[in-house]
Image (spheres, grey):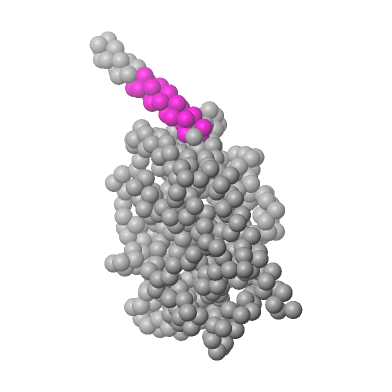
């Protein structure tokens, strides 16, 4: 009997020693990650900084492997329970059903004909997940922490984690239906990130990875240093779990008007809206088109309307928003080969102005009249034109009128043109690593800005 007790004590001691060693390793890596992710690298250092952060994150993930969930039931296995849960909470979805599609995963399928602008889904506020600080195991932290209390997306991410770790959570049917992983930049490898060099998305992805690494390090320290107060989070809060929660919020978040009684329930802030997750509705897949979801404040319901005629058996899509591909990639992990339905119209307009639609080189050297080259100016205005602005350009007989007057299309178009020009020139300059000092970099960018301002001034004087 004594030998068994001694053996048991030896095993327990080894397990304790192993846990202590693991904690010490994680603490050291976490401190390094917090330091590395808190720095703001310049253009020359950004790649090395990203590599350092990525290496630290991978080491942390490897040490935390035991906490990673495996052998989970598929989402399809939880489907019926989730649908029943939604209907019990007031969801109305008699025209559609939730099912799996080969190329899309889960999505909504029409069970009867749905006409354009016909409502097919109604989700009450009681079914929407908001940050409830009165019942959450980390409610006090969400109310008082300087980061969580001021960043609703961070608060909702942490709240989601706490609910996921709570086996008795009332949100269990919904959480079980969420994807196990995502295609957001938080899951990109260094090699995948490097493929984006030269595009505006490159720095956005690196910036996102650095921010989330810093947030994770910060909250890991809080939970582990206050393990008595947050025992579950201290034991199970991992980087993999945090990036999963952040990706869930990034890809599924919505804003609804804040309810009058929400001051003590939802994270306080100056915004009059609340950040929420909308179960069932967020199972809809995206297609470019008209945004037809709204919130009815009188009924406290989210109403979703069809943007196309759907026959029985058709997948019912919604539009997540008319955003550039770069935004979809960073925030949704999505990319579309055809996002601009007006691409042919833009090409036709540019051809009319003498700018080749397929390929065209623009030269900034020795600009005429100290302005941007006319062909570049034409491209900027057409590329950033709205549908109404393109109609205005199409009505003009030729490109000569715009070339002679350099007349701006609108103030909004001018703003978009400058932002596009600034980003593209900035990215191009930064590809010449080591060729420019910081001072030369900003001087070059200021020159481009000066040329743009002179174009605007010339246009203004010509119109008077």
Residue 359 in which image quadrant:
bottom left
Where in the figure is residue 288, as x and y percent of width and height? 45, 73
Total marks shown come to 0
Residue reaching furthest to the right:
464
> As displayed, is residue 158 above or below residue 59?
below
Q: Nearer the viewer, residue 130 or 454?
A: 454
Residue at the (36%, 53%) spot, across then down: 195
Q: Which residues are magenta?
A: 15-35
Is residue 23 magenta-colored?
yes
In the image: residue 340, left or right of residue 101: right
Residue at the (38%, 49%) spot, across then down: 194
Residue 459 in which image quadrant:
bottom right
Where in the figure is residue 182, as x and y percent of width and height? 39, 53
Residue reaching furthest to the top:
2
In the image: residue 379, left or right of residue 80: right
Where in the figure is residue 460, as x and y percent of width and height? 70, 73
> As displayed, is residue 444 above or below residue 318?
above
**Quadrant showing the N terminus:** top left
Where in the figure is residue 285, as x and y percent of width and height? 41, 67
> As displayed, is residue 166 above or below residue 79?
above
Residue at the (46%, 27%) spot, across then down: 27
Q: Nearer the viewer, residue 67 or 444?
A: 444
Q: Nearer the viewer, residue 448 or 305?
A: 448
Is residue 116 magenta-colored?
no
In the image: residue 269, left or right of residue 280: right
Query: Is residue 401 at all visible to an observer of this figure?
Result: yes
Residue at the (48%, 66%) spot, across then down: 362
Q: Nearer the viewer, residue 346 or 221?
A: 346
Q: Main secondary structure of the magenta part?
A: helix
């Amino acid at each position: 009997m004594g030998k068994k007790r001694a053996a048991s004590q030896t095993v327990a001691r080894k397990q304790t020693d192993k846990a202590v060693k693991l904690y010490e390793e994680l603490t050291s890596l976490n401190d390094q990650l917090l330091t590395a992710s808190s720095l703001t690298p310049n253009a020359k250092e950004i790649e090395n900084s990203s590599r350092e952060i990525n290496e630290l994150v991978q080491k942390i993930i490897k040490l935390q492997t035991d906490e990673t969930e495996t052998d989970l039931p598929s989402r399809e296995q939880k489907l019926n329970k989730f649908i029943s849960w939604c209907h019990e909470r007031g969801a109305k979805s008699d025209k559609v059903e939730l099912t799996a599609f080969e190329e899309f995963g889960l999505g909504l399928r029409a069970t009867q004909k749905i006409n354009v602008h016909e409502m097919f889904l109604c989700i009450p506020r009681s079914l929407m997940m908001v940050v409830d600080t009165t019942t959450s195991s980390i409610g006090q932290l969400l109310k008082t922490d300087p980061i969580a209390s001021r960043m609703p997306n961070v608060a909702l991410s942490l709240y989601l984690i706490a609910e996921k770790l709570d086996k008795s959570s009332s949100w269990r049917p919904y959480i079980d239906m969420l994807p196990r992983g995502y295609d957001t930049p938080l899951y990109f490898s260094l090699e995948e990130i490097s493929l984006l060099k030269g595009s505006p998305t490159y720095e956005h992805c690196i910036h996102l990875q650095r921010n989330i690494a810093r947030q994770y390090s910060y909250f890991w320290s809080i939970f582990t240093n206050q393990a008595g107060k947050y025992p579950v989070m201290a034991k199970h809060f991992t980087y993999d779990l945090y990036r999963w929660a952040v990706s869930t919020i990034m890809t599924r978040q919505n804003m609804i008007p804040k309810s009058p009684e929400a001051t003590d329930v939802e994270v306080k802030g100056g915004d009059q809206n609340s950040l929420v997750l909308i179960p069932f509705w967020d199972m809809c897949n995206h297609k470019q088109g008209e945004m037809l979801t709204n919130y009815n404040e009188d009924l406290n319901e989210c109403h979703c309307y069809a943007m196309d005629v759907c026959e029985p058996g058709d997948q019912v899509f919604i539009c997540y928003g008319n955003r550039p591909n770069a935004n979809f990639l960073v925030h949704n992990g999505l990319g579309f080969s055809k996002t601009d339905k007006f691409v042919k119209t833009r090409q036709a307009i540019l051809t009319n102005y003498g700018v080749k639609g397929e390929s065209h080189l623009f030269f900034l050297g020795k600009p005429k009249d100290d302005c941007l080259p006319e062909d570049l100016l034409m491209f900027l205005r057409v590329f950033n034109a709205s549908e109404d602005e393109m109609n205005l350009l199409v009505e003009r007989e030729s490109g000569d009128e715009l070339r002679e007057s350099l007349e701006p299309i609108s103030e909004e178009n001018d703003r978009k043109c400058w932002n596009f020009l600034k980003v593209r020139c900035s990215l191009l300059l930064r590809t010449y690593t080591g060729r420019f000092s910081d001072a030369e970099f900003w001087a070059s960018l200021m020159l481009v800005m000066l040329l743009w301002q002179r174009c605007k001034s010339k246009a203004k004087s010509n119109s008077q």
